[in-house]
Image: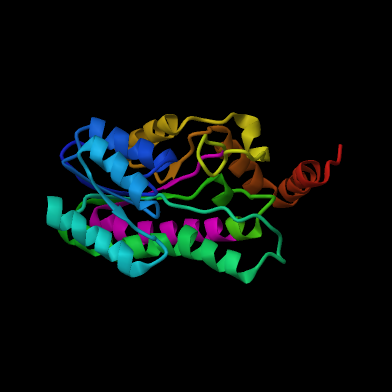
Amino acid sequence: MKIRGKVAIVTGAASGIGRALAERFAADGAKGLVLGDIDGEGVAAVAGRLGATGLACDVGDEAQVQALAAAAERAYGPVDIFCSNAGILRTGDEDQPDADIEDSFRINTMAHVYAARAVAPGMAARGEGYLVNTVSAAGILLQVDSLAYTVSKHAAIGVAEFLAAKYGPKGVKVSVLCPQGVHTGMTAGRSSPAFVDGVLEPEEVAESVVKAMDEERFLIFPHETVYTYMQRKTEDRDRWLRGMAKVRARFLEGAP
């Protein structure tokens, strides 16, 4: 799918990858952009600069996601693209608070469900549309310092696969964006094994998304090494898990 002439929604658009996607879509000639973020002032500033519509939106609240989609249709017409990009990272093991796990599922998993409910049936009725769900490489692999992030992102992959199987034959394409380290507010001031393969700029990630949408690919790997890691995991999961145990020990416990 080409961006020019399309109506797009981007969540988490006040900063980071979401802002870069909004900027790229505007540069590529989107007909209309509606940007959502929990940071209402921040997203309004980005929208004002791009000539877009910016709205405060908690993507973990379905009513607010529905309102975002309705605002896009009122302003610009039917939604062609929904980039469900907002996410949170709460670190901890299996004993982290239930609230952290529940919040992670709301934002990292259910937000994609809410986006699909809001726009996918209309896209299918028109025979064309695109859902881009930001998942992170953790959805394919593992986040060694967060159970909540790992399981919510793995669940998000399942959501996207289900949607692709249901809506793909009806002309609605689905992609999952799975970067490792990116210079965003989420990564600022912290270290992670994901940074070993380099930390990308949000604009580089946006370029990967646009290219993948043009090719209509399900998996988007801005860090190409993630594909190799996925293959290794699939070929020998026991060996891969032993490797992840070593990574976790080095990262969290200072083991050699």
Residue 246: percent from the left, percent from the top?
Answer: 79, 44
Q: Is residue 161 magenta?
A: yes
Q: Residue at x 38, y 44 (%)?
A: 14
Residue 235: percent from the left, percent from the top?
Answer: 65, 46
Which span of residues is magenta-colored? Answer: 151-180
Q: 144 or 189, which lies in front?
A: 189
The N terminus, quarter of image:
top left
Q: 171 or 23, which lies in front?
A: 23
- Main SS type for the magenta part? helix
Q: Is residue 165 magenta?
A: yes
Q: Is residue 163 left or right of residue 30?
A: right
Q: Residue at x 40, y 59 (%)?
A: 112
Residue 252: percent from the left, percent from the top?
Answer: 77, 46
Q: Residue at x 28, y 57 (%)?
A: 169
Residue 158: percent from the left, percent from the top?
Answer: 48, 60
Q: 122 or 219, which lies in front?
A: 122
**Is residue 107 at all visible to an observer of this figure?**
yes
The C terminus, quarter of image:
top right
